[in-house]
Image: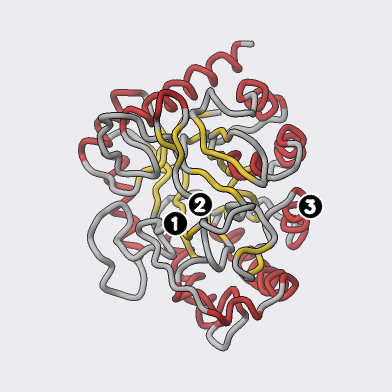
Amino acid sequence: MKNAWAIKILDEEVLNTSVQLGVKDIVVYGGPGFRFLPGTEVKLNKPRATLEDYKKLVDRVDSYGLKIAAIEGGIGCYPKYRDLLLGGPKRDEIIEELIDEIRDIARAGIPVLGYHWMLNCVWRSEDIKIRGDSKARYFNLNTDNFQPMKHYPIEHEFSPDDSNITSEDLWGNLEYWIKAITPVAEEEGIKLGIHPDDPPVDSINGVPRILSSFDSYKRLIDIYPSDANGIEFCQGTFSEMNEDIYEMIEYFAKRNKILYVHFRNVSSQLPSFSEEFINNGYVDMYKAMKIYNKYGYEGVFMDDHCPLIDNDIDFPGNWGGYRSRIFAQGYIQAMIESVKKS
């Protein structure tokens, strides 16, 4: 088991900080579904990132003595890939382009690609105050004030036609994709993992969401039994489900399906939750990590969706600034050491 954190923009400051803090593995937000060259703020002025672009990314990280554990793309929310999810006329053309890009990612030396299968992406209600008046993302299914997150740098375009698709349509299109891409991933030596729908509900605004339960992930891994068909295990989102989080970790860790972990905590399960400090949610994180360890998980734990604390400094990654993320990172490193020694 290893520690990691997720970064969008690989500037000198964050890479130096990674070395200083002992963060040896990096998850990069980029790749398919992003409109910037991976690891940069440079707009992508071509159909997709190329092998050369991914090699530059890997070389930059390597030059600091660090390693890329995974790259995490958008895919589902990106309008370019809508026909992939909807089974539209450009589906096969999209798949061929993604095959080429995934080959390039693998050949650049990146071992894992994480992505999602959400037509209308991540939704939240208004932020709320939590411990010490820090600010956290919040969701309440019983209200009507939740909105899609404008989750830079993914582009969002929502179509009324999306509500015409059924859950089984989405499943059929997912199966078509998995059966097309998994043999390519096996050939190239890369693993592909899907992030759960966040929030994990059956539908939002009439648009179905299918990867939102324990059973749905059992179905996913059975589509094409392969080490290359795995799970981007966002423990925070799995914890939002009305399921037993410890049972889910055990089930998928036993089967070697967890490719990497978003190691974050939430206040409670649906219908409402807030994204808490790593040591302040309902999940016993030490108990959770012991289960990963017991069943042989050897991947990374990355911090994710950290609360906003006063006077923090922007971090070139996901939600939360440097102070908040360093707190989570230190907690993860200490917990890994403790679990390994127990």
Question: Three-letter amino acid code at disc 1?
Answer: Met
Is residue 255 shown left or right of residue 39? right
Question: Residue extending furthest top?
Answer: 342
Report the Cα–Cα distance between label 1 and label 2: 7 Å
The answer to which of marks 3 and 1 sits earlier in the sequence is 1
Category of crowding for the residue at label 2, using alpha-carbon neighbours closer than 10 angstroms: few (below 14), some (14–19), many (at least 20): some
Report the Cα–Cα distance between label 3 and label 1: 26 Å
Disc 3 secondary structure class: helix
The answer to which of marks 2 and 3 sits earlier in the sequence is 2
Is residue 100 shown left or right of residue 139? left
Disc 1 secondary structure class: loop
Which numbered dot is residue 149? Answer: 1
Question: Three-letter amino acid code at disc 3?
Answer: Asp
Which numbered dot is residue 124? Answer: 2
Disc 2 secondary structure class: strand
Q: Nearer the viewer, residue 186 or 263?
A: 263
Place of residue 241 in the rendered image (x, y in percent of width and height, measured from the top left): 69, 45
Residue labelled with disc 3: 215
Q: Quadrant of the N terminus?
A: top right
Numbered label tally: 3
Say whether marks 1 and 2 touch (CB < 8 Å).
Answer: yes
Report the Cα–Cα distance between label 2 and label 3: 24 Å
- Colouring of the image: secondary structure
Place of residue 27 in the rendered image (x, y in percent of width and height, measured from the top left): 43, 43
The answer to which of marks 1 and 2 sits earlier in the sequence is 2
